[in-house]
């Protein structure tokens, strides 16, 4: 961004993605939500346009652009009405492979990244576990050395798109925690084949985003070649940390995009719906919540793009990225709630879409990190208060 607005090149990115999204209307996303069918046609269209590689290096077929441009892509997708059904279908492709970019070998980058960018390989990311949650140091999945590499056993939860994945980016403990100097040491990162004979993926029924499933994984004696280790053994958690801030920013702008989509629906309905001889949008009781939602969305958006600009400039953006995720999620959810209420009873009806946005907007308030952990981070790192946990 140049100051507080997009450059011509960034406007072209937004327009290019919007052109793709024009082929996927509300009926398409409503159908995905009702049937649970993955939006394959949408993902194929985004791959064909080169958008999955927006932040990947040019040397492997990507566009070589930054987090700012990736955020523009993802926000445009969500704001089109695709919401998190669309955004989550490609979210992992955008910055998920960054550990391979930054820490993989040249052979790993040259072999894996073009296949991810083209959509030929479909990856999932397995980090969270049932007994650890956000306490990554307490991961129980083990990777034990064998003569040819590693054998992995354990469980993962909330792994997105495991039903269609042929590749998995997986973190596991290679050194017992009690044998490390620090709890976060001894974790290693692997990018390997999703072997369904050794990985049982079971979908988790959930409130929204039915078309992009989350799974419980049961991993039993998964043999992984030594060449599938990313970077050095024992440094997997450090590699994950390098991608946390971009993920926060992308969730923030996607949540803002959903809020904007909901707000547009509500404003249009409020102008058309006539009760007691006047459009309901003429009443301040309807106007004010929507106006407040707009203000909150725009404020959150500014902080998200500030965080992206700091990241792209190689500067520290931890506070801004976390705060933007917090504000974006809250603003997006509030806007969706206001949109449902502005529609009255019809806000509860699927045909107006705002109930879908409302259900999906909850995701950003929970994942990939809770609101409370973000506030802990800001209290400790920005305000220099004692650690509370």
Image (tube, grey):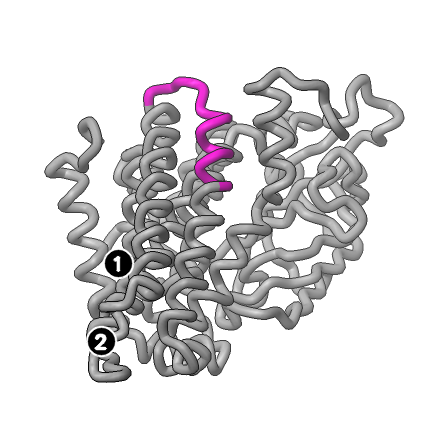
Residue 210 in view, yes or no: yes
Q: Which mark is residue 279?
A: 2
Q: Callout 1: few (<14), some (14-19), or many (20+) C-alpha neighbours within 10 Å? A: few
Residue 54 coordinates in the image, percent (x, y):
30, 43
Residue 78 in view, yes or no: no
Q: Residue at x 47, y 49 (%)?
A: 329
Q: Residue at x 35, y 51 (%)?
A: 292
Residue 309 coordinates in the image, percent (x, y):
32, 27
Name of the residue lying farthest toward the front: 276
Instruction: Report the front residue among 65 and 26.
Output: 26
- Above or below, 208 relative to 74: below
Which residue is tagged 1? Answer: 48
- Say which element carries label 1: helix
Q: Comparing marks 2 and 1, which lies closer to the viewer?
A: 2
Q: Residue at x 17, y 53 (%)?
A: 16
- Mark 2 and mark 1: Cα distance apart in space: 43 Å
Q: Does 315 lie within the magenta span? A: yes
- Which residues fall within the magenta stretch? 313-326
Left or right placement of residue 154 versus residue 206 in this view: right
Quarter of the image where the N terminus is located: top left
Q: Callout 2: few (<14), some (14-19), or many (20+) C-alpha neighbours within 10 Å? A: some
- Above or below, 105 relative to 52: above
Q: Residue at x 38, y 36 (%)?
A: 304
Residue 48 coordinates in the image, percent (x, y):
26, 58
Instruction: Report the front residue among 353 and 176.
Output: 353
């Amino acid at each position: 961004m140049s100051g507080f607005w997009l450059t011509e090149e960034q406007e072209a990115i937004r327009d290019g993605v919007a052109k793709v999204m024009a082929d996927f209307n509300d009926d398409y996303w409503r159908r995905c939500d009702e049937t649970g069918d993955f939006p394959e046609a949408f993902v194929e269209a985004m791959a064909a346009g080169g958008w999955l590689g927006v932040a990947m290096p040019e040397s492997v077929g990507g566009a070589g652009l930054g987090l700012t441009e990736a955020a523009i892509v993802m926000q445009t997708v969500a704001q089109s009405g695709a919401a998190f059904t669309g955004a989550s279908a490609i979210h992992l492709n955008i910055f998920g492979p960054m550990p391979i970019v930054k820490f993989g070998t040249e052979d790993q980058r040259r072999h894996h990244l073009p296949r991810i960018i083209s959509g030929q390989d479909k990856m999932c990311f397995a980090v969270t576990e049932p007994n650890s949650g956000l306490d990554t140091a307490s991961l129980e999945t083990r990777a034990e050395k064998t003569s040819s590499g590693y054998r992995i056993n354990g469980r993962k939860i909330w792994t997105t798109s495991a039903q269609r994945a042929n590749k998995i980016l997986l973190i596991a403990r290679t050194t017992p925690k009690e044998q490390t100097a620090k709890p976060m040491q001894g974790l290693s990162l692997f990018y390997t084949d999703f072997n369904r004979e050794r990985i049982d993926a079971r979908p988790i029924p959930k409130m929204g985003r039915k078309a992009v499933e989350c799974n419980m994984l049961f991993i039993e004696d998964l043999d992984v070649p030594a060449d599938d280790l990313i970077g050095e053994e024992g440094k997997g958690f450090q590699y994950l940390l390098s991608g946390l801030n971009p993920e926060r920013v992308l969730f923030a702008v996607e949540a803002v995009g959903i809020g904007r989509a909901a707000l547009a629906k509500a404003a249009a309905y409020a102008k058309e719906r006539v009760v007691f001889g006047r459009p309901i949008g003429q009443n301040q009781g309807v106007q004010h919540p929507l106006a407040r939602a707009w203000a909150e969305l725009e404020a959150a958006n500014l902080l998200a793009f500030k965080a992206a600009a700091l990241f792209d400039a190689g500067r520290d953006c931890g506070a801004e990225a976390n705060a933007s995720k917090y504000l974006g999620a809250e603003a997006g959810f509030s806007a969706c709630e206001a949109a449902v209420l502005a529609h009255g009873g019809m806000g509860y009806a699927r045909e107006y879409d705002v109930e879908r946005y409302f259900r999906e907007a909850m995701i950003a308030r929970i994942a990939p990190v809770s609101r409370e952990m973000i506030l802990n981070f800001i209290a400790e790192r920005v305000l220099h208060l004692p650690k509370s946990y």
